[in-house]
Image (cartoon, helix red, strand yellow):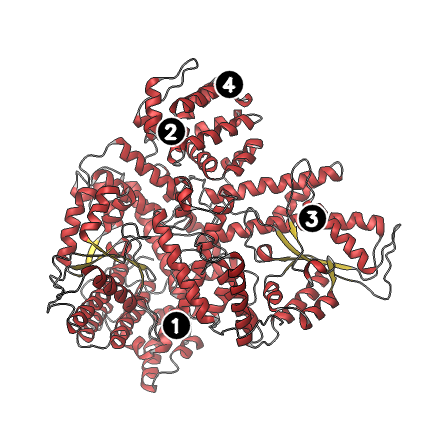
Amino acid sequence: MAARKNGPVTLREGRLIARLRRAPGFAVPKVLPDAVKDAVASSSQPVRVRLDTLLATHDDARAVLAAVVAHSPFLTDLIRVDPARLLALLETEPLEALAKARADTVAAVDASSDEAEVMAALRRLRAQTALTVALADMGGVFDLVTVTAELTATADTAIAAAVAFLVREGIGARKLRKTGVEGLGYTVLAMGKHGARELNYSSDVDLIVLYDADRAPLAKDVEAAPFFVRMTQRLVRLIQERTGDGYVARVDLRLRPDPASTPAALSVEAALAYYEREGATWERAAYIKARPIAGDLDLGQDFLRQLAPFVWRRALDYAAVSDVHAMKQDIHAFRGHEAIAVEGHNVKLGRGGIREIEFFAQTQQLIAGGRDPRLRTPRTLEALAVLAQTGWIGEGAREQLDEAYHFLRRVEHRLQMVADAQTHSLPEDEETLAGFARFMGYGDRETFAQALTQRLTRVQDHYSKLFEDAPPRAAVEGRLEFPLKADDRETLATLHRLGYADPKVASATVRGWLAGEPRALRPDGMREELEAIVPLLVDALARGGAPDAGLNAADRFFREMPTAQRLLAALRHNPDLVRLLATILGTAPRLGEMLAHRPSLLDALLDPAFFGALPDEPELAARLAADLAQATDEEDRLDRARRFRQEHHVLISVRILSGTLPAARAGEAFARLADVIIRSLEEAVVARFREAHGTLPGAEIAVLAMGKLGGREMTAGSDLDLIVLYDFDEESPDSDGPRPLYGGQYFARLTQRIVSALTTPTNAGQLYEVDLRLRPSGRSGPVATSLPRFKTYQAEEAWTWEHMALTRARVVAASPGFRARVEDAIGDVLASPRDAHRLAADIVDMRGAIADEKGDDAPWDLKYARGGLVDIEFIAQYLVLAHAAHEPRIIDTSTLKVMEAAQRVGILDVQDGQLLTDACRLLHDLTQVLRLALTEPFKPAEASPALRRLLARAGAMPDFSTLEAHLFETQRAVRATFERLLSAEPKRRRKRA
């Protein structure tokens, strides 16, 4: 729905309530909904009466407010906290009201010397802005430009007021000579969306803080660096810390030079030296949007003027164009197809998303902005318009990208209105997505999905063609020719410039391919196909940063392949596939070996459905059943199961490496695959077992998934943690088959057969490793446990850690009736009342014991590091065990879903919930990549540049240094949260539940 233009209006006509217009999907309630009445129930009677009167005569306003309380807990809470604020903003012109609120806040901060008062004033401004802008946005009063400009103006005002307050404090403490912010020698630059005045509802504010010691009016004996670093830390606290009034914005300082090793505030001299010495192309792109917003604005402008030659180069050679093209590949390694899974899609970073539109504009600005100053605008839509005016893009492309940008930003804003969370991903289940579609003004999920995919596909089409014909760096650096009889001297020089340590060996390797040394490359026509892809492959392997190792991996790949005809034809016609293959060979050699033995798996990448929705469980089960139905004997059945698992593991893994599958969905995909295989083999084993041994009256068996499988957080290398439970009629303990077995012996033998089917190596390899140690009594207990014994053990004998493990228990295979009995038994254990202090003490004690055994001081040991996955999992398990007795809605086997549910029901506050869910996603994303790439511990200093780039992309960071800074900061925050939430100090070893 298009917003109406904001023309001059009288005050009465300009009232927000009179201008609100409902979206087509918003129903008009006949009377004020109870949820709205509840939200304003705490207000005084005059406020309630006035609201009732106003809303009774404004149908559209009533519809908009009904949509707010139906879909946005965050905005509803803002109304509930201060209904009088809602009344005031409905009766005023919104732009005037926001300008007045900012002016009043500056005046309040200027008049205060109390930090708490200042923080409260800034947070009240943010709350008023959020509610006003949201209603004006949803009601069609503000267009996108106005929405983002008003959100940005509030952030600017808050940060500038906070800096001014800190300056006054510095003067009062005699650290600064009497001064205002002018001439302070300390400046705050807004970057990214903030710098471009394009902030969204829950954006981080990306800041770079700089100082000039020579300009700063520091008192005698005050050193500039520590003073301004502390001042910056105070600034972050004033803006970011959550209080009873909320927060202003999350502050991100990681765009500064080398953030993992530099302080929060940097000298102008050091920053300029860094960019001159090693500034990257992505940093040039970042400074397109830079803008001084607080402190010494003249210093900020001077710095940007000095940096301009770095950002805006008057001449750009082909090597730089190639570098920009490589940046594009780092964002998305593979172009993909039109099929896009809507559920869970990230509208910012996903294919066809906002990032692609921004990249489309920024990179062309870098190419041409040095010669044409008109292209130096920081705003995305303005940049697209100027690119069209100057002939760099067609008017049709501008119109489509402009319209898609408006649509996607509106989706992003609605997502963030729901819970004030910095999220860009759509709901992952159809029911929740249908509710969100209604919040967007659509009647149902399908209509919204169609509108979304139409925009995503258009953006992806324009993005994929960007620099499509740019030559690879290999072609830029010089000649690459590989005659059969001798090395080409110019080619050797080119290989050296590309980074190959031994160009002669590299040349000999490629000449061997062209000579048909690998059997797969001998058939007619192979040489021509290979010659067409060699420059791109050699370049892509060099970009990995370990060219010689990559080339050796490629050599093994070609030599192990049975046939290469279809593969080479596909590579020739799909340059992105060449780059993806180079990424696999350079970062995940085990995956490369699998592809070499089964090159047909790469064909799946060319299937238009490959990057769409993953196969669901029924579809996967049907495929496996159809495959196993063709088995000629038991050995063939096991081989087919193993090949099925390998094939789907490869396809999931390739999607992870190509950046098209986030960790949460990858973990679910690996677990779904394991579930289907376990269930299929269990059914087959039980059927054959009964042929030999018969069955028992009332016999039931259940396979429980535990650990990563239970939580649907599996990686490529995960074992299967299983528990097997059974029951039967103890009055008739003997089986009725040709070779009868007695009671527990029957189920122990059956369990061993199931485990054997899952673990025995065959000609097709091994399926999974299985671990049964989480069963009652561990290694010393029977391999299968009766359900009555399981209940007794959990109630009377289990240790705290066993109840923690049980929070992840999930029934994978069982009859419906027995499944329900087992799930009830597990639920009873989890929902048992517990002493929260004792529980916390046990968990803290156990965490310390794990640290003693495994260590916790290696930050890249993502599982065991302080603030790592174990800390997050233990928090989730504590929350379930401590609170499920009175709040069973938080029970879930997924760590991430426990955190989300705990936040939703109010057990976790918003700040802790956001931190822990973001940290959980980050650590899982990084873990998925590392499990694919390495079998040994990750050592950053020894990692290839390709792997470091892959990790940066997985963590949604521009480079590895920024990722490390983000990771370490996240781990510190998680550990602090762990210690605060589980603050009980263990007085003794307490582990029995």
Residue 133 vs residue 349: left or right? left
Q: Nearer the viewer, residue 807 or 146?
A: 807
Circle 2: element type: loop
Total labels drawn: 4
Residue behind mark 4: 516
Circle 1: element type: helix
Kindly report which numbered mark, 4 or 1, lies closer to the viewer in this rendering. 4
Circle 1 crowding by C-alpha within 10 Å: few under 14, some 14–19, many from 20? many
Kindly report which numbered mark, 2 or 1, lies closer to the viewer in this rendering. 2
Residue 817 vs residue 944: left or right? right
Residue behind mark 1: 76
Q: Which of the 4 quarters of the picture holds residue 109?
A: bottom left
Q: Residue at x 56, y 64 (%)?
A: 892
Amino acid, disc 1: Thr
Circle 3: element type: helix
Give the mark nearer the N terminus: 4 vs 2: 2
Give the mark nearer the N terminus: 3 vs 2: 2
Q: Is residue 659 above or below residue 700?
A: above
Quadrant showing the N terminus: bottom left
Question: Label 3 to label 2, Cα distance in Å?
Answer: 51 Å
Give the mark nearer the N terminus: 1 vs 3: 1
Residue behind mark 3: 680
Q: Nearer the viewer, residue 767 or 83?
A: 767
Residue behind mark 2: 501
